Image: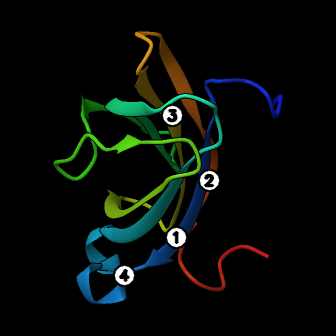
Amino acid sequence: MSENHPYTIDVQVRTRFVPDQSRPDDNRYVFAYTITLHNAGSVPAQLLTRHWVITDANGKVEEVRGDGVVGEQPWMRPGDNFEYTSGAVLETPVGTMGGSYLMLADDGTRFEAPIPSFTLSIPRTLH
């Protein structure tokens, strides 16, 4: 990523297993993830849509598309952050998520902000 690129959204992810909502005996594993978006570009931009690719340890793939995130379509000036928490339910104790956000810059340019693939895992499953 170029520091001078006008259309740059940095994406950071933190995950956690939610044991009180999970039922391993029923192959239900609930995870929460917190996303921090940072407008590292030089133009304001609004998040329009999201696209997720969620894969469990059995290779089952689910794609999720929709408007905004958690009911919002945040607009961020250069330097602004936006943070939200959401969740995913898997049938296995380990899986991955990744995808992208479609952004609209104030100058009318649409661009994608990639969401780097990250792992969802119950504690003590992966090293």
Callout 1, which amino acid?
Thr
- Label 2 SS: strand
Label 4, on which residue?
18
Give the residue at x 52% y 22%. 112
On screen, 25 above or below 108? below
Drawn side of residue 76 relative to residue 87, left or right: right
Callout 2, which amino acid?
Phe
Res. 108 visible in picture: yes
Res. 50 visible in picture: no
Q: In which quarter of the image is residue 33?
A: bottom left
Label 2, on which residue?
118
Q: Looking at the image, tell me whether mark 3 or mark 4 is earlier in sequence order.
A: 4
Give the residue at x 42% y 25%. 103
- Whether residues under marks 2 and 1 lie with C-beta atoms below 8 angstroms apart, the answer is yes
Task: Report the mark closest to the observer, 3 or 4.
Answer: 3
Label 1, on which residue?
15
Q: Distance between the residues labelled 4 and 1?
A: 10 Å
Drawn side of residue 47 relative to residue 107, left or right: left
- Label 1 SS: strand
Q: How far apart are marks 2 and 4 (CA)?
A: 17 Å
Q: How far apart are marks 2 and 1 (CA)?
A: 9 Å
Q: Looking at the image, tell me whether mark 3 or mark 1 is earlier in sequence order.
A: 1
Q: Residue furthest left?
A: 71
Question: Residue 43: x, y in percent?
Answer: 54, 28
Q: Looking at the image, tell me whether mark 2 or mark 1 is earlier in sequence order.
A: 1
Q: How far apart are marks 3 and 4 (CA)?
A: 22 Å
On screen, 53 above or below 37? above
On screen, 47 above or below 11? above
- Whether residues under marks 3 and 4 lie with C-beta atoms below 8 angstroms apart, the answer is no
